[in-house]
Image (spheres, grey):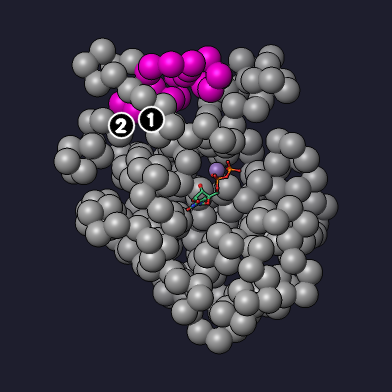
Amino acid sequence: MAAEQAFVTLTTNDSYARGAMVLGKSLRNHKTSKKLVVLIGPHVSNQTRAVLHKIFDEVRVVDVLNSGDTATLTMMKRPDLGVTFTTLHCWTLTHYSKSVFMDADKLVVSNIDELFDREELSATPDPGWPDCFNSGLFVFCPSNETYSKLLKYCKEHGSFDGGDQGVLNGFFSDWTTADINKHLPFIYNMSSIAIYTYLPAFKQFGANAKVVHFLGEMKPWSYTYNLTQGRLRGDVQASSQPGFLLQWWALYSAEVLPALI
Ligand code: UDP
Ligand code: MN
């Protein structure tokens, strides 16, 4: 059995790649002992790929439409599920015994290697519907068998929300009640939604966050940053997470931007 373990993220374009770069750097800065893998779509530019290679141990192109019969056929039958199939591809990384998938729009602010003590499928509750897990971070065990079953599930049931979160919650539907150890604390996937929905809890526990998730339409890279002043331009209040947003930009401008120019 494969002995190594890895953090895995995904980007299908050059914008999300900026997020992946910061995520990778933030994992390294907090001294992870795990491998770092980024799955990329065929449209990611060569310049971006070169920078990703500097940060990640493995940069793997996933082109679901050219990825073997089952995936291609499933894709043909469910063209609506787009990026979802790319995410599911992480189960094919069978040279790792266990992995943690993370969205590219995340910033790690503390070492989180302890997540590898958890079993498949561990994840945090979704802030919108806590009986579902949020698929922005999950612990899983790569397996071709599970991958085939997931594709079969996709073909037969689709996704109730049109994305990977719907598919994964359908497939791992016993997450809600079967084993409390598979419910990860919210600090591993903290999003600013908590500011609107439960401000006292955010004030009480927000500082303990280990991973910040910039969930929603506005991503850190959607803002403009003034390099000399170290400030964000425009309506930053809308983000409700100005502190973490500034941390994201500080890391991006100090450690990623120099490699991009
Ligand atoms: N993603 C991508 N390209 C896209 C959209 C999404 O690579 O055009 C990947 C990326 O890793 C992203 C994840 O899919 O973090 C989930 O999307 P997003 O974070 O935008 O969803 P949200 O967390 O806001 O619901
Ligand atoms: Mn996200």
Inter-mark Cα distance, 2 to 1 = 5 Å
The reply to whether discs 2 and 1 touch (Cβ–Cβ < 8 Å) is yes
Which residue is tagged 2?
Answer: 251
* Residue 93 horizontal/vertical position (percent): 46, 71
Whether residue 172 sits left or right of residue 244 in the image: it is right
Query: Ligand 1 closer than 8 Å to the CB at disc 2?
Result: no
Q: Does 4 lie within the magenta span?
A: no
Residue type at the position of mark 1: Trp
Q: Residue at x 55, y 86 (%)?
A: 69
Determine whether the residue tagged by mark 1 lies in a helix, strand or loop.
helix
Residue 143, image x, y percentages: 56, 75
In the rendered image, the vertical position of residue 53 relative to residue 187, given as above or below: below
Residue 46 in the figure: left or right of residue 239: left
Q: Which residues are magenta?
A: 232-250
Q: Is residue 85 above or below residue 13?
A: below
Secondary structure of the residue carrying tag 2 is: helix
Which residue in the structure is indicated by mark 1? 248
